[in-house]
Image (cartoon, rainbow, N blue to C red):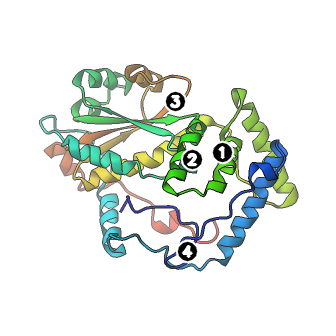
Amino acid sequence: MFRHSRCCSSFTPGTRTAAPTPPASDTVSSGFLATLRSLVTWGRASATVASSASPASCGRTAGCISAGVALDAVEAAVRNRWTCRQFDTAKTIDLDTLRRVLTATTRAPTGFNLQGWYAVVVTSTAVREQLVKAALGQPQVLQAPATVVFVGDMEPERNAPQTLEMGLETGYYDPLYGSAYLRNVYYFLHGGPMQSMAAVKSAVSAQYSRATGTPLVSVPVSRAGYAWKQTLIPATTFVQLCTAAGWDTCMMEGIDEEAVKRVLGVPVDRYTVPVIVSVGYATAAEAEKRQVRSPRFATPHTVRWNKF
């Protein structure tokens, strides 16, 4: 079901109506305000398409499983996921299955499809012995047969040319979209020295939006915050897939990030580590604890309809 997940730009049965192509670079003068105007124009055109679309099914590709079966399977994985803090050191996991899970994880959505994240799989005992110190001594890292370290790219816009090329080759992107795609990515994500340009763009966009009543995209000011947001989507996808594979997981954010980077050789300035995930099988005693699930607020407390 994860492989068939995609972003649907309209909801007309059996068809996919593309969002309006943003103005090409040769039709709009260069510069910050010109880019701002182009995004306003594009946003209005996209809103027009969205408002005229029929709220029906997106349609499915051949070979999709039925919606009911898919929902049951995904819901079961979500509900059965739990946090395991004691792993059975005598049990290993199948690495081919782990590769399959990681490959499926790459289908997780990311902004502009930039895929600015990495998964570093740690199975070596020697590396785990170093990593457990960086994880503040949490024993899961040493007990579990594998720990996956999720790394976020704080400069994902560097992936834009390659992402665009892949999209053009597969037909996912229209050729006319190319220059606008790159311009929009760099406007949204290129922060300049010390994120100074990001702060300026964020302030100007917010002021323009308030003054004109025109919604504009909120430019991220924190590179690390944006990278964490983009990386936690695949990390969450990964733990659900691990549950579906019959494994237990422990997602940990209580780590010394800089120490983790040193252990794994992650470049300090460009990348951030929001979370690590240990994967394996719970001990018998630990498995008994899953009978008492961590509590959740009632759905009406968390889920609001139409208004906050």
Residue 54: x percent and y percent?
59, 80
Spatial separation of the CA atoms under disc 4 and disc 3: 37 Å
Residue at the limit of the structure toward the left, as seen here: 90
Q: Nearer the viewer, mark 4 or mark 3?
A: 4
Number of marks in the image? 4
Q: Residues within 10 Å of mark 4 (few under 14, many from 20)?
A: some
Q: Residues within 10 Å of mark 1 (few under 14, many from 20)?
A: some
Q: Residues within 10 Å of mark 3 (few under 14, many from 20)?
A: many
Give the amino acid at mark 4.
Phe
Q: Going from the N terminus, do you reach mark 1 or mark 2 first?
A: 2
Q: Nearer the viewer, mark 2 or mark 4?
A: 2
Spatial separation of the CA atoms under disc 1 and disc 2: 8 Å
Question: Which residue is pictured at 34% across the width and 22% down the height?
Answer: 133
Q: Nearer the viewer, mark 3 or mark 1?
A: 1
- For disc 1, the marked residue is 182
Whether residues under marks 1 and 2 lie with C-beta atoms below 8 angstroms apart, the answer is yes
Q: Nearer the viewer, mark 4 or mark 1?
A: 1
User: With 249 as the anchor, is 235 left or right in this view?
Assistant: right
> Compared to 92, does 264 lie above or below?
above
- For disc 3, the marked residue is 271
Give the amino acid at mark 3.
Tyr
